[in-house]
Amino acid sequence: MNYLQLQQQYKEESLFGRYIALKHIEPILSQYSVEVIGFSVLNKPIYQLECGTGAIKILMWSQMHGNESTTTKALFDFLNFLHSETPESQQLLRTFRFCILPMLNPDGAALYTRENANKVDLNRDAQNLSQPESQILRAVFNRFQPHYCYNLHDQRTIFGLEHSEHNVKPATVSFLAPAYNEAREINEVRLKAISVIVAMNKALQALIPGQVGRFDDSFNLNCVGDTFQHFNVPTILFEAGHFPKDYEREETRKYIFTALVAGIQYLRENDVVNNKTEDYLNIPQNKVVFYDFVYKNVKINYDDNEKIINFAAQYKEVLQQDKVTFEAKIAQVGGLENFSGHITVDAERQVYTDGEYDFPNIERNADFCLGKNIKIVNGLVKT
């Protein structure tokens, strides 16, 4: 199956970029039979969509964190495919029953924040269930009684996969079969999640070799995935990460769609009983190894002494007039031996100046000059 061609064919064109709020998805949802299953802190509706008549039940939810929208876009691409009335889609609908919550945290989505309107991280509220959104997800879980859960997220650009000292790639997609106990043991339930992840990784390696990671499996029962795995339901965490130069996450969106289709095809075609633990553990673990920008061999004058330093800048995502803008801020000076830049600039010992200081200061805008010929504006070399 040509996953990328399939995604292009069924891509939901009305959704683009990083800022995806309720007002963007409601016109699309009006095409489907949906149900309002509750309301957020600020009384925004939380929608549920069910489709399929099969015996295997899969619960999916996205934008539990409001500023993590890539999987929401991919989910609507997947929905378009499911409703395409092709032999492939009809086969899936006969095999599976899907319950989808495309935006669990509409308040956070509107504000482009991780937390909900009460400033609570819903993915740390699985035990207290203090928030209406958390209570809604648990009620759906209890009612639907899924055989599998898909917990859909984004991760920051800082994550990469270190394959060797000189070959660091971004973690474009990462997965996790969450632990179900403190010992992080692997039981039959967790094995099922592992098997699906291995199948998705196999499909992705053909498209983005060396850019698929395994998220840290430290056990925290306050996290929804750990709780559902503890409840003996195989749960898979998806993390949509960075693809080179793809800050709008339109490329990454393709690979999340690929993972969704490939994993579900695997479940349709296989009795998930084989132990794939070794293949799963061979997926490299995520590491914090990136900044958006690294500037090397920069000369500074500090305390009347000339020094050659390296420093880094990182984008901050800022919501302005319904669009996310990227503002580069100086993030670290020195100590970058274990870090790479998505963009690296070699100053070749040119002198740093920014009109006010002769050395980079943390949290200042990444607007400066390197010598007379290199001008940096918002992190990038201005040509």
Image (cartoon, rainbow, N blue to C red):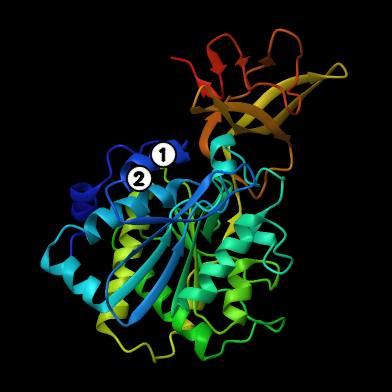
Instruction: Identify the residue shown where x is 17% and y is 69%.
Output: 90
Name the residue type under label 2.
Glu
Which corner quadrant holds the N terminus?
bottom left
Residue at the spot of label 1: 246
Q: Are circles 1 and 2 on residues that touch, CB within 8 Å? A: yes
Residue at the spot of label 2: 251
SS at mark 2 in the image:
helix
Specify the quadrant of the image occupied by residue 287: bottom right
SS at mark 1 in the image:
loop
Residue 105 percent across, percent down from the top left: 56, 49
Instruction: Identify the residue shown where x is 17% and y is 57%.
Output: 84
Name the residue type under label 1.
Asp
Residue 67 in view, yes or no: no
Specify the quadrant of the image occupied by residue 183: bottom right
Question: How many other residues sit within 10 Å of disc 1, few (<14), some (14-19) or many (≥20)?
Answer: few
Which corner quadrant holds the C terminus?
top left
Dot label at residue 55:
none
